[in-house]
Amino acid sequence: MASRLATPRARALGFGLRAARDTRGFGLRQLARMVGVTPQELSHWEVGTRIPTVAQVGLLLGAMRVEPVERKRLLSLAENAREPNWVELARAPEVAAFVEYERAASTVINWEPLLVPGILQTGEYTEALFAEADGLNPGTVEDCVAIRARRRELLRGQDPLNYIVFVGEGALRGGLARPRPMSGQLTHLVSMSEWTNVSIRVLPMSLGFHPGLFGPFAILDFWNLPSIVHLEGYCGSSYLYDDREVAAYRAAAGRMRKLALSEDESRAFIQGVIADLEA
């Protein structure tokens, strides 16, 4: 049974502790012995199913000699780890916590009204997208392209992510001033739509009102942890964990599933948009 302690902050704290341990080459038993806990307890902390005290986190970070900036971030997560929901102020276009949640998820249900989902973006589309954004230096853009390339790898392999996305017609027809990256991106979507673990369905503008008009969202389901809803905003991301809120977004996704074009119809629709771009 999934633990109700696996809040968004608790999981982000666990991701950070595990990353610090792996980066510094500490074994699970070795680090547990250094801070006076069992390996099982430390393992629970690293997946978020149990929450260490701030003092225990301080001991871990001290034992691993974690640098001050990351130490401050992880201690802040520990202080509020039991809070059910979380707003993470963005430090970069790719929010670190979401990437880790996505990596741990078994299924992601995504709605994107205006942009191609990051995990399905081609490098050329991502570069063109951020080239039109203000205030991003070339190094940040390169990092975003690299991170999204690594995210795409989650869709491959023996146990790939099950990815279900509803895409608005606006995401297919707009977003970029240059047609070439858009055409290549849409061709990539057609190719990805053939994968058995990827479902791409289009919601045409002609539908009128539907639940997705309230904004993009992603529902992340996990094998043995409670689901999380991710909401992306201009200044950061929100993570919802409350059962009622998750259920509301799941109901919205269910309604959109009924309204969207079928997978075959969506593939044909995207091919039609490609033809329009190349005409």
Image (cartoon, rainbow, N blue to C red):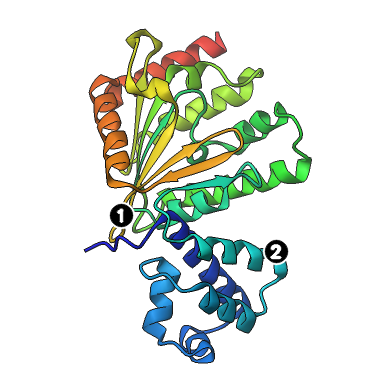
Q: Give the label on residue 69, or none.
A: 2
**Closer-to-camera residue (4/80):** 80
Q: What residue is drawn where x is 45% and y is 73%?
A: 52
Quarter in which the C terminus is drawn: top right
Q: Where is residue 67? Give x, y as percent.
A: 70, 71
**Closer-to-camera residue (164/211):** 211
Picture mark count: 2
Q: Where is residue 55? Give x, y as percent.
A: 54, 77
Quarter in which the N terminus is drawn: bottom left
Q: Amino acid at mark 1?
A: Pro
**Closer-to-camera residue (46/202):** 46
Q: CA distance from mark 1 to mark 2?
A: 29 Å
Q: What residue is drawn where x is 61% and y is 26%?
A: 181
Mark 1: secondary structure: loop
Q: What residue is drawn where x is 54% and y is 65%?
A: 16
Q: Sequence-wise, which precedes: disc 1 or disc 2?
A: 2
Mark 2: secondary structure: helix
To which quarter of the image does residue 244 belong?
top left
Q: Where is residue 165? Give x, y as percent.
A: 37, 34
To which quarter of the image does residue 38 belong?
bottom left
